Image: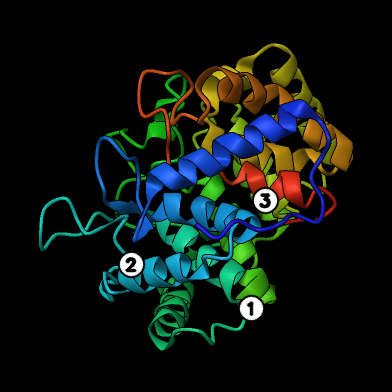
Amino acid sequence: MQWRSLPFVSHSEQFQTILAACRANLVACIDGGAVDTCWRERAQWTGDLRMSALALRSLTENDEVIDLALHQIAQSYNPKTALVSGVWPAMQPGEGLPIPGFHLAFCLAALEHDPTLQRDPLVRQVVQASFDAWQQHYYREGLVQGMPGWYFTDWDYSDPVALGRDEGEVLPNAVCNAWWSDWCAFMQPELAIHPTVFEQSFWMGTAYALTTAKTCASPHATATALNASLAMHHRQDCLVYLEQAIATQEINQRVTPYFAYFVALALQQISPQRSLEFAEGFYGSIAQTYGTIYEKTNDEASLAHGWSVAIAALLTQPESKLL
């Protein structure tokens, strides 16, 4: 790694510990490309790549890792589904693993890395072709819906919908719609989801649900709605919900270090300081205990995971809106 000399790093010892853990995760999980976890598998999961890329740009000069990973994943694009594979290479050779949220993560990672998509013609072609296909086939009735595959959001075992393992009808997903709006901001802003449509589809009275079934309030849906400016009718309610979930430890029980990054971004709407306080409280004890940042909501899986390091971008750029 070629580590950056950071122009701003908090003097807090806790923040320094978190950044050191992020660096340790990168050392463990950068293996040519950005791999899932150093002990279980060396496949590149597309959702992990977006988060690793945020940390790589913040902490290192190693943009070549991001370029390589994006190029490799772009090769898995399936024009029939307009999705890249959720993992590269696929665990079963010759087969894809479509994950709509991870395709969105791939496109957003590409655009966050290179907003004009000039670095790699293949990546540019895939992002543009898939955007056009989503607009034609999946954007209807004011929402993106009907994408095939595994609707994984996070390891939130209190909400089976978040795991994407529901065998029933696949319903419109709030996180996918929020990330579609983020994608539109780069490509074609007028196609972003309208806040009124989003509200009618996902609002539960105190927070947003993950799907139109509205089975339970979701910190994942609520945070991404705030980040995509889709919660304008309920911004204060959403922030109150997130603060209550933090106070009761619900966030720690339902949100992994992967998605806690998006919660931290949402809290920037209160203040950068509040966002940093949350990051310190959520990631600090993990980093102090393990010297790395683990995958799930506890230490029963990977202890150094590719998707757990995006918080480094917020710690080093606390005044920036990173989405």
What amino acid is at disc 3?
A: Ala
What amino acid is at disc 2?
A: Ile
Real-space Cα distance between discs 1 and 3?
A: 26 Å
Secondary structure at badge 1 equals loop
Q: Position of residue 220 (x, y in %)?
A: 58, 36
Tell me the residue at 32%/40% (across/down). 38
Tell me the residue at 71%/34% (across/down). 16
What amino acid is at disc 1?
A: Gln
Residue that mark 2 sits on = 73
Residue that mark 1 sits on = 188
Secondary structure at badge 2 equals helix
Foreground: disc 1 or disc 3: 3
Which circle marks residue 313 in the picture?
3
Foreground: disc 1 or disc 2: 2
Q: Position of residue 224 (x, y in %)?
A: 64, 46
Which circle marks residue 296 in the picture?
none
- Image vertical order of residue 158 relative to residue 239, above or below: above
**Do residues under tags 1 and 2 come within 8 Å of each other at their CB atoms?**
no
Tell me the residue at 25%/73% (across/down). 80
196 or 236: which is nearer to us? Answer: 236
Q: Residues within 10 Å of mark 2 (few under 14, many from 20)?
A: many
Real-space Cα distance between discs 1 and 2?
A: 23 Å
Lower sequence index among marks 1 and 3 = 1
Q: Position of residue 189 (x, y in %)?
A: 69, 74
Lower sequence index among marks 3 and 2 = 2
**In the picture provided, is 237 more to the left or to the right than 49?**
right
Q: Residues within 10 Å of mark 1 (few under 14, many from 20)?
A: few
Quarter containing the C terminus: bottom right
Hey, which residue is sitting farthest top in the picture? 248
The part of the image, by quadrant, that contains residue 56 is bottom right
